[in-house]
Image: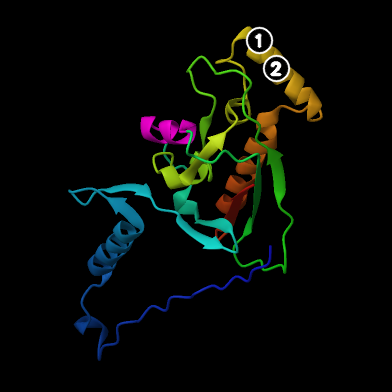
Amino acid sequence: MSYSSKQACANQQGVIGAAAQTIPDQRPFAALQLRQQQLMHNGTNSSAAAVLQRVTKTTVSGWERFEVHKGDLGKGSGTNSTTRAHVNDPSTKKPSSINFAYHEIGISPTSITANKIENPQSTLSYKSGSYWDAGHKLGRQNGGSGTDTDWVFPQTPSINQGNTRNMTELEKQQYETFVDSQGGDTMSQKWRSHEDSFNSLVSKSSAGGYWWFKPS
């Protein structure tokens, strides 16, 4: 995957006056301006109260790229009945594997190596009656939405949930067999640990980070 990163810098205009005492106190205006900018970046409800942050998602060379900043962390949402029904709909494509990558904004390598994790269909339905979980393309902890069908994908439940609390005894056996076939590591760690690493990267960065997602 090749791409180039460009950063835009916003310039702030100062207030110039003939004498300091003739310049109005700009702090209330600056606070209001900042609030307006925050509301533009955030979703707002009818009372103009800030709700979930809106991470920027764009398509680049067949990949979905999410631009995440510190203010987006922890502002994601869980899945709902609509997105869970969507991923289990027969017409929704079920990817056999998932490719993903991430890095800090401003770092522009000519290419990056994507991680890949298999995404097999469960042999049996979970107790919920569903074969697929609504997996976040961008993790909830990183600002990803679980209520928008375009932000979720059909994900193997055992990989998404990372435990066996919702499994039948037979499913637990199948899960353990699958984990062993993949090298013995807990499958959720192959996915969740990267989400944790990206969260740490963004929280420490002054520029934010990009999370790349591509099903196959």
Position of 66 with respect to 170 (left or right) is: left
Observer able to see residue 75: no
Disc assigned to residue 174: 2
Please state which of residues 197 and 166 is positioned toward the viewer in this rendering.
166
Up-down relation of residue 145 to residue 82 (above or below): below
Q: Amino acid at mark 1?
A: Leu
Position of residue 190 in the picture relative to residue 92 (left or right): right
User: Which residue occupies 48% across, 57% down?
Assistant: 57
Q: Is residue 108 above or below residue 86?
A: below
Q: Is residue 85 magenta?
A: yes
- Write down the quadrant of residue 65 in the picture: bottom right
Residue under the point 54% across and 29% down: 132
- Report the coloring of the rendering: rainbow
Q: Nearer the viewer, residue 65 or 34?
A: 65
Q: Is residue 64 above or below residue 131?
A: below
Query: For the view shown, which residue lies furthest in the top direction?
Result: 169
Q: What is the crowding at mark 1: few (fewer than 14 residues within 10 Å), some, or many (at least 20)?
A: few
Q: The N terminus appears in which quarter of the rendering?
A: bottom right
- Mark 2 vs mark 1, CA separation in Å: 6 Å
List the residue tagged with mark 1.
170
- Residue under the image location 59 percent in, 14 percent down: 167
Asked if the residue under mark 1 is in contact with the one under mark 2, i.e. CB atoms within 8 Å, the reply is: yes
Q: Which residues are magenta?
A: 80-89
Residue drawn at x 56%, y 73% is 6
Residue 7, image quadrant: bottom right
Quick one: SS at disc 1?
helix
Closest to the observer: 40 or 90? 90
Residue 47 can be seen in this image: yes
In the image, is residue 137 above or below residue 134?
below
